[in-house]
Image (tube, rainbow, N blue to C red):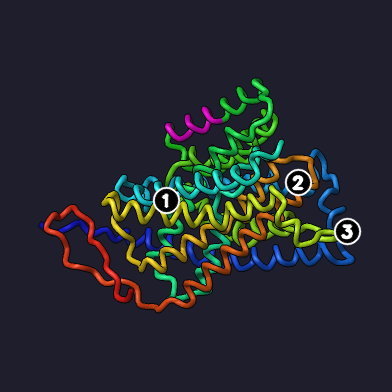
Amino acid sequence: MTAPDPTPQPHLKIRLRAFLESEAAGGILLMLASALALIVANSPLATDYFHLLHVELGPLSLHGWINDALMAVFFLLVGLEIKAEVTEGQLASWSQRRLPVIAAASGMAVPALVYLAIAGTTPGLSRGWAIPAATDIAFAMGLLGLLGKRAPASLKLLLTTIAIVDDMGAVLIIAVAYTAKLNLMALLGAGIALVCMYALGRAGVKRLAPYLVLGVLLWLAVYASGVHATIAGVATAMMIPRAAAHRLEHALNPWVAFGIVPLFGFANAGVSLAGMGPEILLAPLPLGVALGLFLGKQIGVFGSIWLAVKTGIAPRPRARWRQIYGMALLAGIGFTMSLFIGGLAFPGDATLGDEVKIGVLAGSILSALAGYLLLRSTSTATTSTANPPSDSNAPTQPVDVQP
């Protein structure tokens, strides 16, 4: 019996290729925007930069509109990507989910444990345990894009699927761990908006406009409820019918990759280093975040993949172990989501907020440099395929061309 062809359908290939390309380009723009923010925050323009972020525009400051409103659109796209992968993509079956779920779960748990071991004993800092738990897919894919053929497609696909599962965990963490006092009436309103969207879907409504209008109402209700408003973006994505979801994902992708994410980086990466010495990196909070990202992620992601392969739980990806380790290092780029969670963990505390930024920048830069240099120095030869096993349902195991 011939083994089933695991190759994604052509339209999924096209969608995945477009997604990876835009994420890579958007990631490079994110790097530039974040570097610009750091430069501006330590230049004569610093006062204007920080003042601009705190300008009140109606009910929110400019910073608030970016982090609460525009990031809800970012999370809407995240939700659409999760839905697409779970229903028809690389997470559609348990055999496909197994390795990314294991790697992502371990890649969130180990960084949190590293953080708690370093900063958790300091009063008030344990709330930051989730800061190093998430991976910034835009930043990581930007670096993989720069590597060209030295980063095989299988590696990009694995990192993408791990990051998508990672995003699921981050959304759950935000909803559960960083929720303030609940406004039950607002939650009721959010529930009504969700029920209305569900009813539209059951009625076969495929026009986007009704879902988007209800999504805005859902955002307002969730914002008032005490649950972080960006969760409304993910919830809305889950309710949009598949056909409409594809159209919306395609429309949102460039706006998020080239607009919202770089703008978020520019608004959140700026930290004044005036009066700070290298010793700030040894303070519990920045050290816990930096080592959680740099050490915790690589240990969690690579270690769990190695164990899963060696124990036969999942087949090894079509890449050399050296390349898989380089990918695990890149998973330590927490940036966007880490900065976002840091703002939720220590709201209103400028000192701790700056320490979070320093830790996130240090850990992400270390992970980016180490992963990039390792993959850059690796031969473009990847894997060859061994003879397929007699069991037609068993996955083909790759073997190294070089040690």
Q: Main secondary structure of the magenta part?
A: helix
In percent of the image, x 62 and y 41: which residue is there? 230
Q: Which of 196 and 158 is in front in this view?
A: 158
Circles 3 and 1 in contact, beta carbons < 8 Å: no
In percent of the image, x 17 and y 58: which residue is there? 3
Residues drawn in magenta:
194-202
Q: Amino acid under label 1?
A: Ala
Q: Nearer the viewer, residue 344 or 260?
A: 344
Q: Quadrant of the N terminus?
A: bottom left
x and y percent of residue 270 in the render?
Answer: 76, 58
Q: Amino acid under label 2?
A: Leu
Judged by depth in the image, the label closer to the viewer, 2 or 3, is 2
Q: Name the residue under label 1.
A: 103
Q: Name the residue under label 3.
A: 48
Q: Amino acid under label 3?
A: Asp
x and y percent of residue 99 in the render?
Answer: 36, 51
Q: Does the magenta stretch include residue 198?
A: yes
**Which mark sits nearer the N-terminus, 3 or 1?**
3
Q: Which of 112 and 90 is in front in this view?
A: 112
**Which mark sits nearer the N-terminus, 2 or 1?**
1
Task: Give the left or right position of residue 347, taking residue 242 as reference.
Answer: right
Please tell me whether mark 1 sits on a helix, a strand or a loop: helix
**Which mark sits nearer the N-terminus, 2 or 3?**
3
Q: Name the residue under label 2.
A: 352
